[in-house]
Image (cartoon, helix red, strand yellow):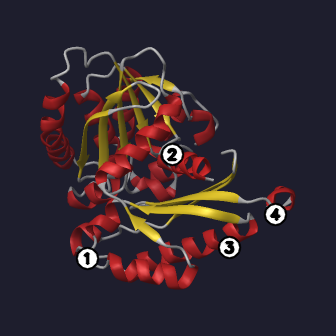
Amino acid sequence: MDGLKETKHKPCVAAMDLGTNSSRLLIADKQGNALYRDVKHVALGERLAESGCFCQEAMERAICSFMDFAEMMKLYNVTSYRAIATAACRMSSNTADFKAEVKKSSGVEIEVISEFEEARLTLKGACLNAPSRPKYLFVYDLGGGSTEVTFATNTATPEILATYSIPLGARNATEMYHLQDYDANGVAALEAEVKRQLADFLAKVRGYADYGDAAVISTSSTPLRLAAWILKLDGYDKFAADGKTVSTADLDALIEQILPLSYEERAKSVYVGANRAKIFVAACVIFRTIYQALGATEVVASLKGAQEAIISELTKAC
């Protein structure tokens, strides 16, 4: 609480990011320094792939997260914020009702952003972890309901040269391909569909003769968890794993070990945990299929993404 006493009277900014699995809050001062973070496992996209709409239980979990976030924003005297929602809210038939209830319960106005805007924000945040040498960047954000893949210049103001939103993420792919536990047929079918979805994107990218001079950065918890595992950290420490580079050879070997594990074994792992165990097989399959398709020899795991981009833009507007 000492931090609150020091900062509660100083105007702050906040970024909220509602995904298919998690609801996230980042509060920063007007200089962009992070003061407070929170992540709620809300599983908003639970059963969305089957029903086409949010179930009541999932909406209640997400609404409660925004009520908690609103209280923290009051404590930190947040005067400007942006709350974005991504794939799940783009897909659901009852998003309008859900947004209205969030506004009524918490006062937070949610903005459902496009695939391109999601890619733009993710790229801008991920660039904070970009190595300086390569000419280009491949950035992909593996969410719960979609995966945004972007090819851009590695410059002070990156230019998006190609981007594509794969309509598959860890949660909906788990449900669609029945991958709560490992199934060889389900894995093969998911890999094939991800490759099919990537085909046009890769065709555009290969139009650049030197496209191979690119760093690959992957955001979301999956690369961070795998990096923490490879680095033999004491557990899933997303801050310690942020910005770390791991070889795809090490990733291949680790994923081969993970896929056959039972749900109970994944849940007990200090790098996965109970909240992620159910969707981690599909997450690993999508993550691996993409870096293999890109021909990457190493991947940078990035905690920094859309929220950091929002904070940057809010502070510049102050």
Q: Quadrant of the N terminus?
A: bottom right
Q: CA distance from mark 3 to mark 1?
A: 29 Å
Residue receiving disc 3: 71
1 or 4: mark nearer the eye = 4
Viewer-side residue, 240 vs 155: 155
Callout 4, which amino acid?
His
Q: Which dot marks residue 110? A: none
Callout 1, which amino acid?
Ser
SS of the residue at dot 1?
loop
Residue receiving disc 1: 93
2 or 3: mark nearer the eye = 2
N-terminal of the two: label 4 or label 2?
4
Q: Quadrant of residue 253?
A: top left
Residue receiving disc 2: 309
SS of the residue at dot 2?
helix
N-terminal of the two: label 2 or label 3?
3
Q: Say if residue 50 shows up in the picture.
A: yes
Residue receiving disc 4: 9
Contact (Cβ within 8 Å) of mark 1 with mark 2: no
SS of the residue at dot 3?
helix
SS of the residue at dot 4?
loop
Contact (Cβ within 8 Å) of mark 3 with mark 4: no
Q: CA distance from mark 2 to mark 3?
A: 23 Å
Contact (Cβ within 8 Å) of mark 2 with mark 3: no
Q: CA distance from mark 1 to mark 2?
A: 28 Å
Q: Tell me residue 146's x, y (percent).
A: 30, 53
For label 1, count other residues whose C-alpha is less than 10 Å away and answer few (under 14), some (14-19) or many (20+).
Answer: some
Q: Tell me residue 118's x, y (percent).
A: 37, 50
Callout 2, which amino acid?
Ala
